[in-house]
Amino acid sequence: MKKFEYTIKDELGIHARPAGMLVKEAKKFSSKVTITKDGKSAEATKLMAIMALGVKKDQTIEVAVEGADEDAAYDAMQAFFSANL
């Protein structure tokens, strides 16, 4: 399992549009991608679960990647968050 922390820079936090893009990105991999904020976790392939976390600007989340292609998924998730959130 690989993990990284990321502080959200988007003014609106993780809102509908980037959450939808995140789901599409996570579904490209067989590895399980989990986002955790304040002890609550959501699978990155479940849009409503991500939205329910209510992540706002300047909050830090943990992204964990585990599975067969975790190295590629880890790199893709880091790139996604840097580019979009």
Image: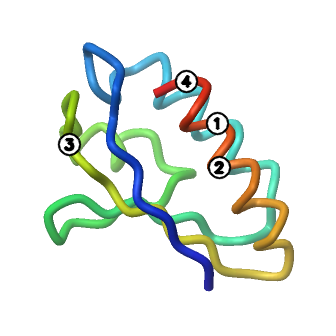
Q: Quadrant of residue 80?
A: top right
- Contact flag, marks 2 and 3 (Cβ < 8 Å): no
| Pointer 3 residue | 59
Q: Quadrant of residue 84?
A: top right
Mark 2: give few (<14), some (14-19) or many (20+) Cα within 10 Å: many
Marks 4 and 1 sit apart, C-alpha to C-alpha, by 6 Å
| x and y percentages locating residue 36 in the rendered image | 32, 63
Q: Earlier in the sequence, mark 2 or mark 4?
A: 2
Q: Earlier in the sequence, mark 2 or mark 3?
A: 3
| Secondary structure at numbered mark 4 | helix
Mark 3: give few (<14), some (14-19) or many (20+) Cα within 10 Å: some
Residue at image coords 23%, 39%: 55
Farthest residue in the bottom direction?
1
Amino acid at pointer 3: Gln
Marks 1 and 3 sit apart, C-alpha to C-alpha, by 17 Å
- Contact flag, marks 4 and 1 (Cβ < 8 Å): yes
Q: Which mark is residue 84?
A: 4
| x and y percentages locating residue 30 in the rendered image | 80, 67
Amino acid at pointer 2: Met
| Pointer 1 residue | 80
